[in-house]
Image (cartoon, helix red, strand yellow):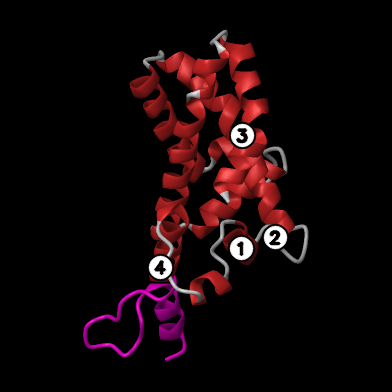
Amino acid sequence: MLDSIMDAVKGQVVSAIAEKTGLPLGQAEKALPLAQESVTEGITGALSGGNVDGLLGMLTSAVSGGSGGGGLLENVVYKGIAGNFISKVTSSLGLSEGVASTISSLALPMIMSKIGGATQAAGDTDGIDAGSMMSALGLDAGSLLGGLAGGGEAGDLLGKAASMLGGAKDAGSSTGGGLLGKLGGMFK
């Protein structure tokens, strides 16, 4: 899913970076794989850490132009992704932190807006919820039931989601770990 989103925004992002920073198009284009890595790592980290609300807030803010979820720039998941991306740009491309910050402020909101739009489109309503987010990221129930044999980005995300939802059983407990285990524990 993220590959198709990156392909869809590539021209717009590269043009914006080149125009605002004065970098040649070829060098501006080298930032895109770093952005994709940072976004993937940020989403995976938030899912594995159980911060689904943070992800939803980030995507809602990205789609609403910053009015939802406390604003995109205020979102802890977004801040982590942006920090990681800036670090990657400075170390991999040898650019100053100021230029890397400019690239981040141009590229990441466009990418997040596109991910948020895909999440909205995946749902039954215009809202963004966990189900539509999971579907848009390729983590829908069908994919989870289909097995985790996939590998790569989608397999990694599916594995994180499955462990978060099911988790391992706690020692001496009949309740599973993860979110489902915690929910089950509420009704004892």
Mark 4 or mark 2, which has the lower sequence index? Answer: 2
Q: Residue at x 58, y 46 (%)?
A: 58
Task: Identify residue for label 3.
Answer: 109
Dots 2 and 1: beta carbons under 8 Å? yes
Circle number at residue 135: 1
Inter-mark Cα distance, 2 to 1: 6 Å
Mark 1: few/some/many CA within 10 Å (<14, 14-19, 20+): some
Q: How many marks?
A: 4
Task: Identify residue for label 2.
Answer: 122
Mark in the foreground, 4 or 2: 4
Identify which amino acid the numbered label 4 is placed on: Ala
Mark 4 or mark 1, which has the lower sequence index? Answer: 1
Mark 3: few/some/many CA within 10 Å (<14, 14-19, 20+): many
Circle number at residue 149: 4
Say which of 38 and 151 sits in front.
Answer: 151
Mark 4: few/some/many CA within 10 Å (<14, 14-19, 20+): few
